[in-house]
Image (cartoon, rainbow, N blue to C red):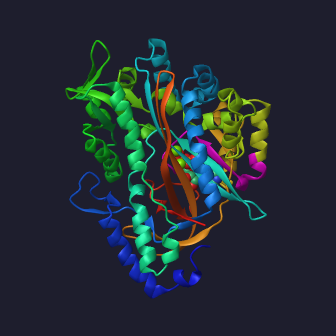
Amino acid sequence: MALPEDVLTNGALIRDLEEVAKDIALLHGVLMRTKETPNSSEVVSYAPFTLFPSPVPRAVFHQALAVQPHFNRLVDRISQDPNFLKEALASTIKVDDFTARLFSIYRHVLQEGRSQSIVVGLNRSDYMLDQGPDGSTALKQIEINTIAASFGGLSSRTPDVHRHILKVAGRLEEQKLVLDNNPAAGLARALAKAWELYGSERAVVMFLVEDVQMNIYDHRYVENELWNRNIPVIRRRFDDVYKTGSLDNDKRLFVDGKEVAIVYFRNGYMPQNYTEQSWEARLMMERSLAVKCPDISTHLAGTKKVQQELARPGVLEKFFPDDPEAVTQIRATFAGLYTLDMGAEGDKTVAMALANPDQFVLKPQREGGGNNIYGADICQVLESVKDSTERTAYILMDKIQPQPVHNYLLRRGSPLKLCTCLSELGVFGTYVRQGTDMLLNECAGHLLRTKSAEHSDGGVAAGVAVLDNPLLV
Ligand code: ADP
Ligand code: MG
Ligand code: MG
């Protein structure tokens, strides 16, 4: 462990640091609106974060950064492969209404023909560090988020907070081990590139936002990077697009009378985000000439079912016929992933999960945290669906077992408490393609999120994890 126990158990020091930490977070703009007034900035608070950065081995950290451009290419290639997407999702869309609905938009766009050849991808590949019995640490991907991947803004500000706390704690050597990070700039760079390619100075970047906007400051960092380049940004909800949006004869998208160059989805990744009108609005945006971030095919490329299909032998090779090194690097991060499709292979998965439920996670096709199934619940759910096609709504995954670390979690309204914590490392990937030319393909920075080990699931938005920084060891 990077920080000695005597720091963590020094009550007077911790109380001091708690006060310093909250103030410095506010000063550096690590902000969130409150639950009570999520759509107003009259009264705001700090976003939840750890008191100290958490140790991450240098080698796996750099491994995660290095593999990101390959993941960008992989996601992009999947998004251009209708046969693969159709086959991979065939069983899922029979039983999962949400994925089916997305897929029907995809089909519509394929039939009509894509109107836009510019693609901008902003994704975040998330990992946990699996602790082997021999003490080894392996980087294992949890999932890749191809839509609405958040915290690129706030994570650009948290390094200064942790460095300051470490200085006040007298840990001058450790504070040098907290790296600079600026995903906001990287995300904006890709959006700006796509906006330039779209080629209309008056056209705006539209952030498609939630009805409840607690995490607005995270967006604002990216937004401001765009305004600084004189790229106009508007923020609209599905309902606004439904009411004031239209396509002209060339399928240019207009919202509130403004031409939209890019739709940047920060919403639309879960069923609760949609009314019938929202689905109509989504279809209109997908059919339009606006650049979509992500487009519907890239959204589908990020489903958990696709992740499981990619883990099958020979599949990665098909996407990288010319680049065995990319295949090796990507595959090294895969945990065991198992199909629940009907047939002998799926039956084997069921038996394996029922025999050792604690070694696995059962995942439906959902995003946003809090949807996965663990331990005894796996048996309960599988027992009820194992003989029907309903089981194909899920995939099974090896449970990753990271090394727990002690830390304090700061969250508005909760007393500070020493927790046994687990961390998840995210890496932001950005790319811009026009036709067949990859014009930008970058790793744009990182995000560390940490949660108390008593929770098996849930992200920052779900109120479980908090923002953190890697302390490279
Ligand atoms: P979501 O799209 O909802 O974020 P994830 O696959 O990221 O779905 O799962 C949510 C959370 O569940 C993760 O942040 C992690 O804490 C936990 N989790 C997911 N998969 C695993 C796994 N294979 N091993 C251990 N924990 C996992
Ligand atoms: Mg996700
Ligand atoms: Mg996740």
Residue displayed at 50% across by 41% down? 442
Q: Position of residue 199 (x, y in %)?
A: 31, 25
Q: Say whether residue 357 is magenta.
A: yes
Along the viewing direction, whichever of 413 and 473 lies nearer the viewer: 473
Q: Say whether residue 155 is magenta.
A: no
- Asked if one can make out residue 95 in the rendered structure from this viewpoint, the answer is yes
Query: Over which residues does the magenta segment extend?
Result: 353-371
Along the viewing direction, whichever of 382 and 12 lies nearer the viewer: 12
Residue displayed at 38% across by 59% down? 157
Residue displayed at 38% across by 37% down? 191
Q: Position of residue 282 (x, y in %)?
A: 38, 28
Q: Position of residue 169 (x, y in %)?
A: 45, 80
Q: Quadrant of the N terminus?
A: bottom right
Q: Quadrant of the C terminus?
A: bottom right
Position of residue 174 in the picture relative to residue 377 (left or right)? left
The relative height of residue 415 versus residue 384 in the rendered view (above or below) is below
Q: Position of residue 273 (x, y in %)?
A: 39, 38
The relative height of residue 439 versus residue 418 in the rendered view (above or below) is above
Image mark count = 0
When asked about the image quadrant of residue 44, the answer is: bottom left
When asked about the image quadrant of residue 5, the answer is: bottom right
Position of residue 400 in the picture relative to residue 232 (left or right)? right
- Asked if one can make out residue 97 in the rendered structure from this viewpoint, the answer is no
